[in-house]
Image (spheres, rainbow, N blue to C red):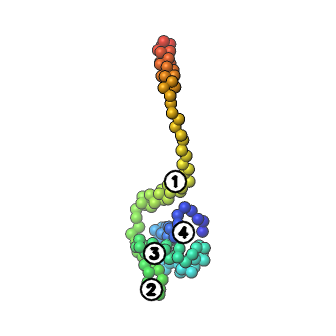
Amino acid sequence: MKRQTLPPHAEVATMLRHQILSGALAPGRQLSRLRELIEKLGVARMTVKQAMDALEGEGLAERYSGRGIFVREVELPVRQALNMRADLSELQSVVAQLRVSVVRARPVTLTQQRRQSDFEEGFTQHRFKME
């Protein structure tokens, strides 16, 4: 599994959430067993458990003791909400790649200010003379 800026459990939860909301995992279908996900994704047991807990907390999955975790029947959000989630994911990756640079402001002396205003005044006078 390719690592990004999100914690591993959030990446796993995002992947499973996408499969549920897209319909790839139908309501009532059992999610892959813990051991299978661990091997398939190459992550720790706790990572998969945290992802499953998150899905259960969001109401996307339901845990049955001794039987496993199953996809719940969910009302799919309107397409715009899914697009917004994708836009937010893109924004997160862009923000993670931003580099902050600090530029020092240098003090401007009164002499420099006069030169600038003289230049601007001369430019204005010259422009009006030409017309």
Q: Quadrant of the N terminus?
A: bottom right
At which x and y percent is residue 91? Answer: 50, 55
The answer to whether marks 4 and 1 mark residues whose Cβ atoms lie closer than 8 Å is no
Helix, strand, or loop for circle 1?
helix
Q: Mark on residue 86?
A: none
Question: Mark 3 = which residue?
Answer: 53
Helix, strand, or loop for circle 2?
loop
Q: Which of 25 and 126 is in front in this view?
A: 126
The answer to whether marks 4 and 3 mark residues whose Cβ atoms lie closer than 8 Å is no
Type of amino acid at the residue the image marks with label 2? Ser
Type of amino acid at the residue the image marks with label 3? Asp
The answer to whether marks 3 and 1 mark residues whose Cβ atoms lie closer than 8 Å is no
> Which residue does the image show at 50% across and 13% down from the upper left?
130
Question: Mark 2 = which residue?
Answer: 65
Q: Number of callouts in the render?
A: 4
- The label nearer to you, 2 versus 4, is 4
What is the crowding at mark 1: few (fewer than 14 residues within 10 Å), some, or many (at least 20)?
A: few
Most extreme residue toward the left is: 75
Q: Nearer the viewer, residue 65 or 60?
A: 65
Mark 3 or mark 1: whose residue is earlier in sequence: 3
Q: Is residue 38 left or right of residue 59?
A: right
61 over 126 or under it: above or below: below
Mark 2 or mark 3: whose residue is earlier in sequence: 3
Question: Mark 4 = which residue?
Answer: 8
Question: Mark 1 = which residue?
Answer: 95
Q: Which of 46 and 37 is in front in this view?
A: 46
Q: Is residue 114 left or right of residue 40?
A: left
Helix, strand, or loop for circle 3?
helix
Helix, strand, or loop for circle 4?
helix
Type of amino acid at the residue the image marks with label 4? Pro
